[in-house]
Image: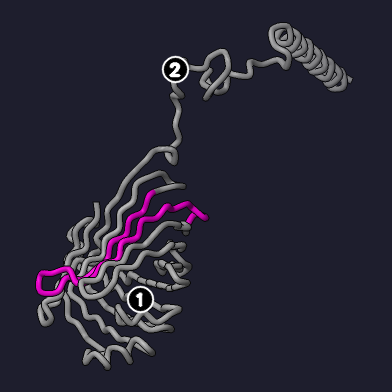
Amino acid sequence: MKPLTNLVLAVSAFQASTALAQMDHSAMQMEASATTVDGRDPHAYSDGYTLTEGPYALPGPRQLKLADEHRFWSLLGNRLEYDADNDVTTFDLQGWYGTTYDRLVIKLEGDAVDGRLAESQTDLLWGHALNAYFDTQLGVRLDQYDEGTGREWLAFGIQGLAPYWFELDLTAYLGEGGRTALSLEAEYELLLTQRLILQPRAELTAYGKDDAVNGLGSGLSDVALGLRLRYEFSRQFAPYVGIEWNGTFGATADQARANGDATKDTRYVAGIRFWF
């Protein structure tokens, strides 16, 4: 009988301790409810810091800012290269200023022949984040020709990183007199080592109407296919060598033949890719 008595005493002691703990907990809840409605300080977990209101809000301008609210800037020289055989310097620059979601984008691309600017294309765009990988862009494009007539366009496009790490830049243009154009650029980076990178690149342009003054025809106008091998001394500075094939098609090729110009060309280039 003695073991049974000990068991009864142990159970009684456990029940008494449980009842005492419940009484203490109820007392704590009653005490907390006397000071706040739901038994806790609603600002306690944020240490009193809120954005705009509350008993602990900091005076003056808002003190707390998230990373995507700050403004940054960047300049990328994707191509700055020279073709010694034809004495042609090509530049392809892009800069932006703004936040993660909205930014001003400037694209500048062109060729200089014999030290003289032959043609250039400048895009002034407002970019807005469509998702984590792509930005939509809206603005204007200004074309300049040494021999020809400059053009102005409204521009709408999308730029970003496609699946399988392809960098895409697709832009549609609308000009005066119902002129239209479409431009597509695609690049891919193949890492041979951590510093040695092979970059295939493709670019094509199409126009909706003939532009005889500037030697452009409707339909697919020109295509450029390039392959560049660069060595990154750092992410900001990388010299490269490469080869690029250029060809004109359709009505543009017909106009080139009529003017005595070649419709296909192969260039061997050396240049520098940089950003900061």
Residue at screen point 30% across, 82% down: 215
Residue at screen point 26% across, 84% down: 245
Instruction: Kindly identify the amino acid type of the residue bearing the numbered disc 1.
Output: Glu
Residue at screen point 45% across, 57% down: 138
Neighbor class of circle 2 (other Cα within 10 Å; few <14, some 14-19, many 20+) is few
Rendering coords of residue 74 (x, y %): 30, 50
* Relative depth, front residue between 40 and 25: 40
Determine the CA span between mark 1 and mark 2: 51 Å
User: Looking at the image, is 88 positioned above or below residue 160?
Assistant: below
Pointers 1 and 2 in contact (CB under 8 A)? Answer: no
Mark drawn on residue 96:
none
**Is residue 132 in the magenta section?**
yes
Rendering coords of residue 40 (x, y %): 66, 16
User: Looking at the image, is 84 positioned above or below residue 235?
Assistant: below
So how many labels did they put on this image? 2
Q: Residues in magenta?
A: 104-133
Rendering coords of residue 202 (x, y %): 35, 77
Residue located farthest toward the front when viewing the structure as drawn = 177
User: Judging from the image, what secondary structure is the residue with disc 1 in?
Assistant: strand
Q: Left of 145 or right of it: where is 37?
A: right
Look at mark 2 in the image and give the residue it sits on.
60
